[in-house]
């Protein structure tokens, strides 16, 4: 790793890579990938991989991630189950899983990992899980629509668009 002292080089996370999908029906600036699974608190959600077959767009201009409804419902249920020690709060716009952390000194969130085609697993930082006290994910209109991986989930990731190599690379804890 260029510019990193040798003793720190071992601490720098490595990139994980997933194939970049192409489509004649979408603009070439839509960088599409295939999400295969979501893991919450170390447990894969019970969602068949076919639910993600419409692909996901890596979208830095979209704030929160949008998932197929089947996947979102499973994520929301697992997240709520892991967050029972906190008071719930009313929804904020399309964010329907919100919490009131008033007076809470320390918040423990369940881990969330996105697993992409080729086994690329991206562990989300806490900053990529909540937005204004709400789970920073929402459903798309149908399971057949492409999803979006929004900029909240990308906050602490380095994302490399390797268009010639037809891959997207992620590195955690980069920002």
Image (tube, rainbow, N blue to C red):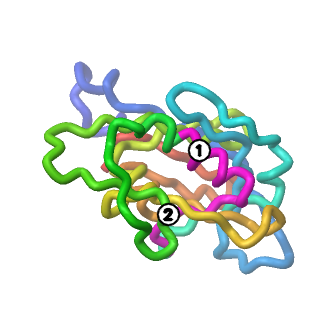
Of 152 and 119, nearer the camera is: 152
Residue 149 vs residue 159: left or right? right
Q: Is residue 1 magenta?
A: no
Q: Position of residue 21 (x, y in %)?
A: 77, 59
Residue ID at (32%, 58%)? 133
Of 32 and 169, nearer the camera is: 32
Residue ID at (50%, 63%)? 96
Q: Is residue 120 above or below residue 63?
A: above
Residue ID at (77%, 52%)? 52
Q: Secondary structure at mark 2?
A: loop
The residues colored magenta run: 62-78
Q: Position of residue 55 (x, y in %)?
A: 76, 59
Residue located beneath label 1 in the image: 77
* Spatial separation of the CA atoms under disc 1 and disc 2: 11 Å
Mark before the other along the chain sequence, 1 or 2? 1
- Location of the N terminus (image quadrant): top left
Residue 88 vs residue 52: left or right? left
Q: Is residue 69 above or below residue 3?
A: below
Residue located beneath label 2 in the image: 96
* Residue 174 in sight in this render: no
Disc 2: CA contacts within 10 A as few (<14), some (14-19) or many (>=20): some
Residue ID at (55%, 68%)? 59
């Amino acid at each position: 790793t260029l510019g990193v002292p040798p003793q720190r080089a071992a601490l720098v996370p490595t990139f994980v890579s997933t194939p970049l999908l192409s489509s004649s029906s979408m603009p070439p600036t839509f960088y599409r990938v295939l999400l295969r699974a979501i893991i919450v608190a170390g447990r894969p959600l019970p969602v068949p991989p076919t639910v993600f077959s419409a692909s996901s767009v890596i979208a830095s201009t979209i704030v929160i991630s949008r998932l197929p409804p089947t996947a979102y419902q499973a994520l929301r249920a697992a997240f709520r189950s892991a967050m029972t020690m906190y008071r719930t709060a009313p929804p904020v716009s399309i964010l329907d899983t919100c919490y009131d952390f008033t007076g809470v000194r320390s918040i423990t969130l369940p881990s969330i990992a996105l697993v992409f085609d080729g086994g690329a697993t991206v562990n989300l930082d806490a900053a990529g899980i909540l937005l204004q006290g709400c789970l920073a994910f929402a459903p798309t209109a149908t399971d057949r629509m492409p999803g979006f991986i929004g900029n909240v989930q990308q906050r602490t990731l380095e994302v490399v668009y390797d268009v010639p190599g037809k891959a997207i690379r992620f590195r955690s804890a980069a920002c």
